[in-house]
Image (cartoon, rainbow, N blue to C red):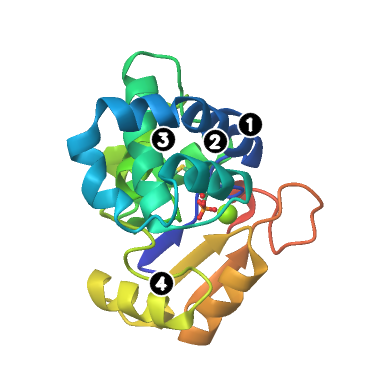
Amino acid sequence: MVKAILTDIEGTTSSIAFVTDTLFPYARARLADWIAAHAHEAAPILKDVPGDPVETLTRWIDEDRKETALKTLQGLIWAEGYADGTLKGHVYPDAAEALRRWHAEGIGLYVYSSGSVAAQKLIFGYSNAGDLTPLFSGYFDTTTGPKKEAASYRRIAADIGLPVQEILFLSDSVPEIEAARAAGFKTYLVDRETGAGDVASFAEIAL
Ligand SMILES: CSCCC(=O)C(=O)COP(=O)(O)O
Ligand SMILES: [Mg+2]
């Protein structure tokens, strides 16, 4: 019996293109100016960034590195774009519909993304389907652990307070699905592109 659902964002609830073609370039273009204008706020984050921070962070964006320092900074920069209306979070209609239905059925909903918790709240809070944040009971990011390690999922289950077998994890990433399965989670591989996953949209998910 599924009592909670933990979902990935990029490629699962939301399009890969929105993250790579809109969010990443938005932060990349503003990185240097943002750090210069927020030196005090940036300092504790930049202590984990080797070398010239702007150079390193720009390279990490281009390499799609899931470094916590980069993800924290991206979330802070995106906040300005969401607040002034330049950014609108992309959520697939089938995902928004299913999340609303599962919430109404009493299933606990949680997010696990490499994007920071602040960034997760932004994409769902300022989404094209409206403010979806009231649907979620909790958010997890790389501060809980890497998404490709089973131990991260065990920590999340302990935090949620449910046995692993009662939590369903949704992701478009095979290594993430394998890690969650190794921890004992139920899983669905969501493949919106080729149909090679367990489901191609949230509308196909049977609990
Ligand atoms: C929170 S939206 C931005 C997502 C992001 O920065 C990212 O790296 C995508 O990671 P995910 O774990 O959602 O695939
Ligand atoms: Mg993903």
**What residue is pinned by disc 4?**
167
Q: Sequence-wise, which precedes: disc 4 or disc 2?
A: 2
Q: Quadrant of residue 130?
A: top left
- Which type of secondary structure does the marked residue at label 1 adopt? helix
Q: Which mark is residue 177?
A: none
Mark 2 C-beta to ligand 1 under 8 Å: yes
Amino acid type indicated by mark 3: Ile
Q: Position of residue 152 (x, y in %)?
A: 39, 76
Q: Given this view, does label 4 or label 1 mark the residue nearer the observer?
A: 1
Q: Is residue 42 above or below residue 190?
A: above
- Residues packed near mark 3 inside 10 Å, few (<14), some (14 to 19) or many (20 plus): many
Give residue 165's quadrant in the image. bottom left
Residue 150: % across, % down:
47, 81
Distance of label 3 from label 4 (alpha carbons): 23 Å
What separation in Å lies between label 4 and label 1 (alpha carbons)? 32 Å
Disc number lying in front (2 or 3):
2
**Under 8 Å from ligand 1: the CB of mark 3?**
yes
